[in-house]
Amino acid sequence: MHIFTAAIATETNSFSPIPTNEANFADDFHPAGSLPDTPVMFAAPMQVARRRAAEQGWRVTEGLAASAQPSGLIRKSTWEAYRDRLLADLQAAGPVDVVLLGLHGAMMADGYPDCEGDLLGRVRAIAGAGVVIGGLLDPHCHLTPAMLAAADVLIAYKHYPHLDAFDRAEELWQLCTRAAQGLCRPVMASSDCRMISLFYTPVEPMRGFVAAMTRAEQEPGILSVSLIHGFPWGDVAEMGTRMLVISDGDAAKAQSAADGFAQLLQSFRGSTMTPLVPVVEAVKTAAGHNGEAPLVLADFADNCGAGAPSDATFLLDALIRADVPDVAIAFLHDPQAIDLCKAGGVGARMPLRVGGKTSRFSGPPLDLDVEVMHIAENARHDFGIGHFEAGTVVVVRTGRNVDIVMSSNRIQCITPAAFSDFGIDPASKRVLVPKSMQHFYIMFSRLGGPVLYVESPGVASMDLPNLPYARINRDIWPFNAAASLCDRHHAVP
Ligand SMILES: [Zn+2]
């Protein structure tokens, strides 16, 4: 058995003002054969294949692995360069039995609204009809007809936060290598849920929904069940939530299961995410909070994990203006402010213009008097199944113990280590503000305080009906409150 495996992933926010080019991929680019053993989330299929193939005595050829922090549209030349390099790696591998790809599923480049469909189609053309092609997806993806037509097996992470990337990669490995040995015959079917939302799986009703998907996979003939959450900020025709079921050779069974889950999900409309709280209300709650554990205010719409700039000041400004004491916020992306702080050094007291630099979606810059509290070079932010290179991290203090953790790289705040690694005791704070929309939840909720998701303005706003979409199908919930289940992709044998 000869397996080829590679990974290329990012998530494209059509409303993000940050273009994506080679530089965005450069921080997390591993040419063929150079992927480390330390966990790299989007390369999970490669790292699982490396381990499992060694156990079996099978041959694995690794192609490139590349990912970029979610941003705006990818430059045409950038996409074509990475795609063609991956395809060259596949060609150089010679005949293979299985192709396993670590993907995201919401990549858009100039001229390529469906990068994954483009890639999978070309992989199929090179690999040939008899080769099993499998892809691991982030559920915040667009499931397109081109992807379904070219791949044999597509599996999405079940959990949001995505703690199960490596578990799903194991399933992808099992399913694809079994299919290549003739031990099963995967048949995919999808069902359009005619909706878009976010789906918070640690809490009901989605926790039970995930459990039901896992139970269904134990039923005879059902090989895999995935919920494609969809990515609300990708302006493509296929934007939306879909069920994806893989059966063992039975297209009708796969379709019926997908439709059943889609109908169940429709009954959860409006209840799959925690309601957002207006900034004014969040600040009022913060001012009155005197519990033992810090109040957590998620700066929802400035989540760089969904393509936002991470330099928005709306919530921070409101907290400072209300004179709320003992606040800490992370990570605010501001390389220019970091350079000034480095010039001043730890202990410097100086005026500093913070944030609000990328576009009007970031709000105004804040002119603050600060003290430089901490400088860390080559910092990283670990989150278990991977890590972010943070670049230089600088902490400045302003007002009544308001600590701002700035990073020179644009990264999402996922654990309270964003504070404790840089000299701030999270437990000593009244309010913690992670710039994140859900990945922060598991580790921050363990601190024991209340968690509010704040409806701050930004490019990842949930005010979807007012976003300037041009290509989506608006005949889905919440754009059309009555959108029902009547359209679906057909099974692809
Ligand atoms: Zn995701």
Image (cartoon, rainbow, N blue to C red):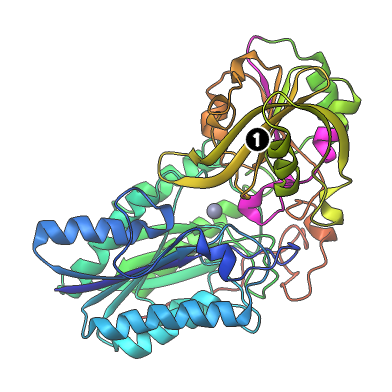
Q: Quadrant of residue 91?
A: bottom left
Type of the residue with mark 1: Val
Q: Quadrant of residue 353?
A: top right
Using the rendered image of the protein, determine whether residue 337 is visible from the camera's viewpoint: yes
**Magenta span covers which residues?**
292-317
Q: Is residue 134 magenta?
A: no
* Above/below status of 428 relative to 8: above
Q: Is residue 309 magenta?
A: yes
The foreground one among 199 and 163 is 163
* Above/below status of 428 relative to 334: above
Residue positioned 78% across, 57% down in the render: 464
Q: Quadrant of the N terminus?
A: bottom left
Q: Quadrant of residue 239?
A: bottom right
127 left or right, relative to 269: left
Whole-percent x and y of residue 20?
A: 63, 68
Instruction: Please identify the residue farthest to the left as the structure is shown.
Output: 57
Mark 1 secondary-structure assignment: strand
Q: Quadrant of the C terminus?
A: bottom left
385 left or right, relative to 455: left
Whole-percent x and y of residue 384?
A: 41, 39
Using the rendered image of the protein, determine whether residue 490 is visible from the camera's viewpoint: no
Q: Is mark 1 within 8 Å of ligand 1?
A: no
The foreground one among 409 and 44 is 409
The foreground one among 377 and 212 is 377
Q: Which residue bears the numbered disc 1?
A: 394
Q: Dot 1: within a 10 Å radius of its alpha carbon, few (fewer than 14), some, or many (20 or more) residues? A: many
Count of numbered circles on the image: 1
Whole-percent x and y of residue 90?
A: 31, 81
Residue positioned 57% across, 26% down in the render: 445
Whole-percent x and y of residue 126?
A: 33, 89
